[in-house]
């Protein structure tokens, strides 16, 4: 029966590492697709449906202003009263333009919007404009068109507006359901990846143990038995090809030692036989006996050499096997190390979405003892971490004398570093200028970090602190959308709050608070 051809140990390790790399790549692709679906669903709700609802409210308000202005003008014939009407027309046109862009690809909502515009035009051309023209022709002129006609035409506008609102609300419910489904899908994918990763690692560990570690251990034990003097014990060969070849080499050495020991035993037996013969001979053979005794001594010395010096190579082989066992538990050859580096590089890239996620999740979970630290030192460390970006952008950082607070130094450094990094990233045409200020507000220090960058619309003051929320295209301003969410979590973990100062007219200014150190408690301690 032909012997089964076994893989070399190098191929076993390379295949294991390649399998792990393929799994990691698949995990990155699947996780990325799930996160992409979640991002698309969130963009539909936040970027289209919600703004469309706001513009629909604006459109309704503009039409109501037109009707109110017209009604006042009919009663008083005062052109100043027409201001809401003319302003409402402008606001209506602006809202319609915004809605046309937001409702692209939503046929039902587009039809509702067209119906609103059509009914509004009929009310304006069929009633509002003729009435305004008649009153403007003379202060005592009475409009010829009946008021009920205008009311009926505007009621049609209201009905169309209600239809548009109903369509948008239904679309929002549908989009919200899709967002929830996408979030559940992401959670399921992450759990599946974690479980599969654990199973893959367990399978690889068990496979390597049976394919490499256990055969090495068995070979080492077999060699130890031989090194203790049992030269008749055959070394059984198992495992990868390299280990089987090594076991065969040990057997060759063992058989050579057995052959040498056999020759020594034969020499001892011959010496004993000759000694007994010499004892029976006469004294004339004394000289021959002396020669035989000398030969016996030489043979005894040879036996010592065979039993001592020839065992040293076996001890070296045993030690080498022990070293080989330890080596294959963590140290591989250059080719295998190269494959491992490829696998490590792929793992570092998924989670890059999925750890800002993490650093994020560890805040407050891994509790370290807070220490009293100077915020000047923390700011200095943060700017040192950003030295390359500061030099590249030509930025200047100015700061007041900052107080001492009780905090976890790495977390507080991350807050300053994230806020200053955002100031450098979202800069304008001029070199960035960052100003760090502080003032005491009761039991809290209120810090402010202001810049001369592109600024942030106040309507996004809360949205920017939500994880994965971005206001700009990734190609224009790279990032994961986790930085400000992490800042909020760190500040709140330390007992403070963080917000966007919406009162600034240019650039942006972030404020956050940290508790003042209770000096009475420090003195009591």
Image: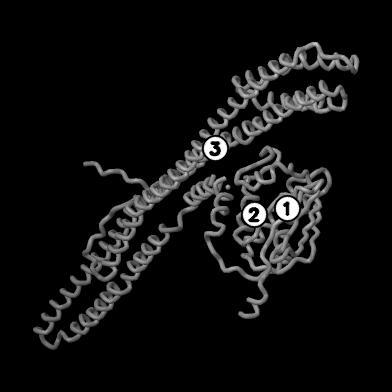
Q: How far across and how far down the image is residue 360, in percent? A: 57, 53
| Circle 1: element type | strand
Q: Toward which corner of the image does residue 408 lie, by quadrant?
A: bottom right
Is disc 1 surrounded by few (<14), some (14 to 19) or many (20+) residues within 10 Å?
some
Query: Does residue 385 appear to the left or right of 324 in the view shown?
Result: right
| Circle 2: element type | helix
| Along the viewing direction, whichever of 18 and 476 lies nearer the viewer | 476
Q: Are marks 1 and 2 in contact (CB under 8 Å)?
A: yes
Rendered residue at 75%/13% (across/down)? 146
Query: Does residue 231 appear to the left or right of 73 in the view shown?
Result: left
Q: How far across and how far down the image is residue 49, in percent? A: 62, 31
Q: Which residue is mark 3?
A: 38
Q: Residue 499, relative to residue 59: is it above or below? A: below
User: In the image as oriented, which residue stretches furthest toward the bottom?
Assistant: 283
Q: Toward which corner of the image does residue 388 lie, by quadrant?
A: bottom right
- Model colouring: one colour
- Lower position in the chain sequence, tag 1 or tag 2: 2
Q: Are marks 3 and 2 in contact (CB under 8 Å)?
A: no
Rendered residue at 79%/54% (across/down)? 434
Q: Which residue is mark 1?
A: 510
User: In the image as oriented, which residue stretches furthest toward the left?
Assistant: 280
Q: Which residue is mark 2?
A: 487
Rendered residue at 66%/72% (across/down)? 518
Give the number of the mark in front: 1 or 3. Answer: 1
- Lower position in the chain sequence, tag 1 or tag 3: 3
């Amino acid at each position: 029966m032909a012997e089964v051809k076994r893989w070399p140990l190098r191929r076993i390790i390379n295949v294991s590492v390649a399998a792990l790399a393929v799994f990691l790549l698949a995990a990155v692709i699947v996780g990325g697709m799930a996160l992409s679906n979640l991002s698309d669903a969130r963009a539909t709700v936040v970027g289209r449906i919600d703004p469309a609802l706001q513009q629909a409210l604006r459109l309704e308000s503009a039409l109501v202003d037109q009707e109110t202005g017209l009604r006042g003008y009919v009663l008083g014939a005062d052109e100043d009263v027409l201001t809401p009407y003319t302003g409402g027309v402008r606001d209506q046109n602006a809202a319609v333009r915004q809605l046309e862009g937001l409702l692209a690809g939503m046929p039902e909502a587009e039809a509702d919007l067209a119906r609103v515009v059509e009914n509004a035009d009929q009310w304006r051309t069929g009633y509002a404009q003729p009435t305004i023209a008649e009153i403007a022709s003379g202060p005592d002129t009475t409009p010829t068109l009946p008021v009920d006609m205008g009311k009926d035409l505007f009621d049609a506008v209201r009905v169309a507006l209600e239809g548009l609102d109903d369509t948008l609300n239904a679309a929002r419910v549908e989009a919200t359901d899709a967002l929830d489904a996408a979030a559940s899908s992401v959670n399921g994918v992450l759990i599946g990846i974690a479980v599969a990763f654990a199973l893959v690692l367990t399978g690889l560990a068990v496979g390597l143990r049976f394919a490499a570690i256990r055969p090495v251990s068995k070979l080492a034990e077999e060699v130890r038995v031989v090194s203790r003097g049992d030269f008749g014990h055959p070394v059984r060969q198992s495992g990868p090809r390299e280990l089987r070849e090594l076991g065969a080499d040990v057997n060759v050495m063992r058989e050579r030692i057995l052959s040498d020991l056999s020759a020594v035993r034969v020499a001892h037996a011959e010496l004993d036989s000759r000694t007994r013969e010499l004892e029976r001979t006469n004294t004339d053979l004394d000289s021959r006996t002396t020669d035989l005794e000398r030969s016996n001594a030489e043979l005894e010395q040879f036996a010592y050499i065979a039993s001592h010096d020839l065992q040293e190579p076996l001890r070296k082989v045993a030690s080498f096997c022990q070293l080989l066992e330890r080596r294959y538990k963590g140290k591989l050859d250059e080719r295998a190390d190269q494959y491992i580096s490829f696998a490590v590089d792929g793992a570092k890239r998924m989670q890059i979405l999925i750890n800002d996620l993490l650093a994020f999740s560890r805040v407050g979970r891994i509790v370290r003892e807070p220490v009293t630290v100077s915020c000047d030192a923390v700011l200095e460390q943060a700017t040192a971490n950003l030295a390359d970006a500061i030099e590249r952008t030509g930025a200047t950082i100015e700061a007041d004398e900052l107080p001492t607070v009780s905090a976890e130094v790495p977390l507080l450094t991350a807050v300053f570093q994230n806020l200053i990094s955002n100031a450098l990233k979202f800069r304008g045409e001029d070199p960035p200028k960052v100003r760090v200020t502080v003032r005491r507000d009761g039991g809290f220090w209120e810090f402010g970090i202001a810049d001369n960058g592109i600024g942030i619309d106040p309507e996004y003051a809360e949205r920017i602190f939500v994880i994965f929320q971005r206001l700009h295209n990734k190609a224009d301003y790279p990032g994961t959308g986790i930085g400000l969410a992490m800042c909020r979590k760190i500040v709140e973990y330390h007992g403070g709050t963080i917000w966007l100062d919406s009162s600034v007219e240019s650039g942006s200014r972030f404020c956050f608070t940290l508790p003042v150190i209770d000096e009475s408690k420090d003195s009591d301690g």
